[in-house]
Image (cartoon, coloured by chain):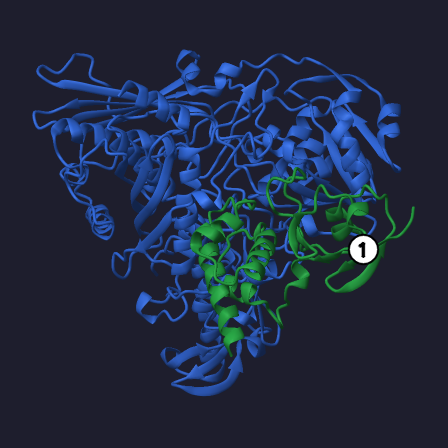
Chain colours: A green, B blue
Amino acid sequence: MQPIPLIVNGRSVSVTVDPDTPLLDALRNHLGLKGTKFGCGLEQCGCCLVLIDGKPEKSCGKALATVAGKDIVTIEGIGTPDRPHPLQQAFLDEQAGQCGYCLPGILISAKALLDRNPSPSRAQIAEALDDNICRCGSHVRILRAVERAARLLREGEAR
Amino acid sequence: MSASPALPPLLAGNPRLDQWVGFPAPGRVTVSTGRVEIGQGVLTAMLQIAAEELDVVSDRILLQTGDTDLTPNEGYTAGSQSIQFGGVALRMACAEVRSLFLDHAAASFGYSRPGLSVHDGAIIHHGEATGHDYWSLSAAVDLRRHATGRSQIKNVGEYGVVGQNAPRVDLAAKVFGEAAFIHDMALDGMVHARVVRQPRRGATIKTVDEAALRRAAKGPIEIVCHGNFLAILGVDETVVEAVAAVAGNHVVWDGLDAINPFQEEARWLLQQPSIDRTIGPPAPTEPTPGATRYEANYTRMHIAHASVAPSCGLALYRDGRLTVWTHSQGVYPLRDALARTLKLDPAAISVKHVQGPGCYGHNGADDAAADAAVIAFRTPGKPVRVRWRREEEFGFEPVSPAMVVMAQARLDASGRPADWTTEIWSGRHTSRPGGGGNLLAAEALPDPPPPAPASESAYPPGAGTRNGEPLYDFPTKRIVHHLIAETPVRTSSLRGLGATLNVFAIESCMDELAERAGVDPVAYRLSVLSDVRARVIVEHVARISGWQAGMRSGTGRGHGFGFARYKNLAAYAAVVAEVEVDENVRLLRVWCAADAGLVINPDGAINQLEGGIIQAASWALKEGVRLDTGGISSRDWESYPVLRFSEVPEVTVELVSPGADHPSLGVGEASGGPTVAAIGNAVAHALGARIRDLPLTRERVMAVLLKV
């Protein structure tokens, strides 16, 4: 097996595994990044979303060989407790979550949205999150949190 | 000497104070609760209760939860009972601990007892520091004693923490992608395992082609086969998962009796043998002269918990001790069930709760833990992690039973019920493992335990019968319950249990009767509702939603109302829904008013009510487990769709306080039934015709439109 190089959260890494290994398994089991979650393994629920070259992509069905050399951002790369991303701050401010299992994937979808559209409407936010399942029913708070984050980001840029 | 006051039941069951509170190091407090976090925010609320009653800042408190080595036995975290029962016990225990320290300070140092108080753990006398605190006195105050219930808990007016919004203590870890869930646990030397499930209960293995399984593996695997329990394990999860995905091709089973797929809709229940019971006065045998009889049937399909991730369990068997990590709602009952399964002494088993995805009831969590335990027991020394596959969770978790409810009323001259019957046909709503058996792994082992007989909980609160009795002032009310023991698929508890369809049936029928009487639905309800707290929230939600009597029906836009007091003894919730219906139902807005008595964390309670509304909207509009001859066929999110972001309504929830000194009422399941009912009534209003079968799908809407 050849090492497969990746850029994960800005760091160059390489993983020596079967090239068919799903990116999700490589992140969780070989790189120790447990923030990206397994939800279905069927690319239907959005729990495993990561940014690949800036685009939100499901990692559960993506063979590692197909993302060799690409720039991957996981929830751990979005922000930290010391330096939270405005999205993470907004989710805490709005208490947007119940069990919280879906949140990493939702934050990735939201990050991708705000990166391309800093002032999305409520309907555009909902559409961007339609690939994500939340079963607890935290949707309304999550929509509010993304709106708040958009506001925080715009204010941050205006300063 | 006065008799001991009665202790709250959970404190009576776990009376030693050191089971609840400890002071392990200067400045640190441990507080234990048998309740577990399932996304409902209970940890935060319990911390608030403990911080309030102990008078310490909550940052000092380490909360231990759901651990048979560490925490009180509180049975299951279920039924919206954590605050109403568990919180009351914790509050009393903390009050007694605080009081013991103050008694000790008064007796040992000559302070006047009434002048003593606690400020963040420090003992204060008439506002002056005494130099003593919980930690300096902890060696002298022995908490290995039984609670007496004689200590004064705080009055609501003294609260500074309880009743205030508190941010969820568990949320930050989840937002930052930390290893917050059981799925994220990694133990040294851990192996990953997947179970090849019996396709049907009672199916037996005829042959296993182990060589083919090994050929399918891209790395080393082990196979555990015992009786009809078959599992694949290995150090590389990817390898194990890939084999599990094709394992069905390499096992031949006997005993694959076909399931009747027509049983996915509920009406087959009406023809089944049943265990029958009447709650309330017997039904009149003679028709009442001059009375009009009204009846209608309401149904729903089986509903899945559909947790966002499949279940997970970890176990390690070493030196005769079994340790199990689980997201089960009941660590003690699971321990007992595992002890029976493995013929171990319960004292040799530790069961520890670790957070999982929201479960909303008895999903696959206990089964996944049992899978891990059975494998670990057969591979001593190796930590075993079992993570179910998505199709396994959908296909094998116990689902909420299909139901038929007939609402029957004999009406008086004003068109109001003089005699009311709620007749219920349902499979079992409770089959948790603590009740005896019901772990898939146990059933697959040689010499499986006998199946637990179907049973129904005592009423109230009931299970299938839950909320079967309307809260309205009908002169005579009864529930006739038909418990169907044999169902095509395994069934158990889901948020609200029978209340969801019972409230849907009662509240739909109330709208039908109101229409018949020519009275506005809200006014009609108020004319038969004397419970003052109920009236307040009914009127409140009517006000905030802008409810107007006489809104025209059949316009394609509709408003609907629904109300219940959960279990008839927990929180009150009234809901108004607004929908637009063309071929599909679009849920536009939902308003909810709720009275939960003393609310510990208002934002937490609102979050639960909001979540209940959205989940119930998903049940009402989209959900039903599909069956084929092989069992549950809806095994992914396409065949079992749930509400998505673009489909959620605007939601407004307001808590209505009944005033001081009302005890806390369980709120987590209160909004579900009223929401389903309000949506059903709104759709009927929009269409000018009623759909009595859930979910309210496009097909059902089209069928009504063709008739109209």
The N terminus of chain B sits in image quarter: bottom left
All told, the count of numbered labels is: 1
Residue B396 position within the rendered picture, expressed as x and y whole percent measured from the top left:
61, 29
Q: Which residue lies at the image location 81% right of the left edge and 62% below the top edge?
A: A12
Residue B188 position within the rendered picture, expressed as x and y whole percent measured from the top left:
81, 52
Crowding at dot 1, Cα within 10 Å, few <14 / some 14-19 / many 20+, comes out as some
Camera-nearest residue between B370 and B642 = B642
Residue B210's quadrant in the figure?
top right
Camera-nearest residue between A105 and B53 = A105
- Whether residue B326 appears in this view of the structure is yes
Kindly state the secondary structure of the residue where label 1 is placed.
loop
Residue A54 position within the rendered picture, expressed as x and y whole percent measured from the top left:
66, 57
**B196 left or right of B702 in image:** right
* Residue sticking out furthest to the bottom: B128
**B278 left or right of B627 in image:** left
Disc 1 residue type (three-letter): Gly
Residue B197's quadrant in the figure?
top right
Q: Which residue lies at the image location 12% right of the left edge and 16% below the top edge?
A: B288
The C terminus of chain B sits in image quarter: top left
Camera-nearest residue between A101 and B359 = A101
* Residue sticking out furthest to the right: A1
- Residue carrying label 1: A69
- Quick check: B465 above or below B670? above
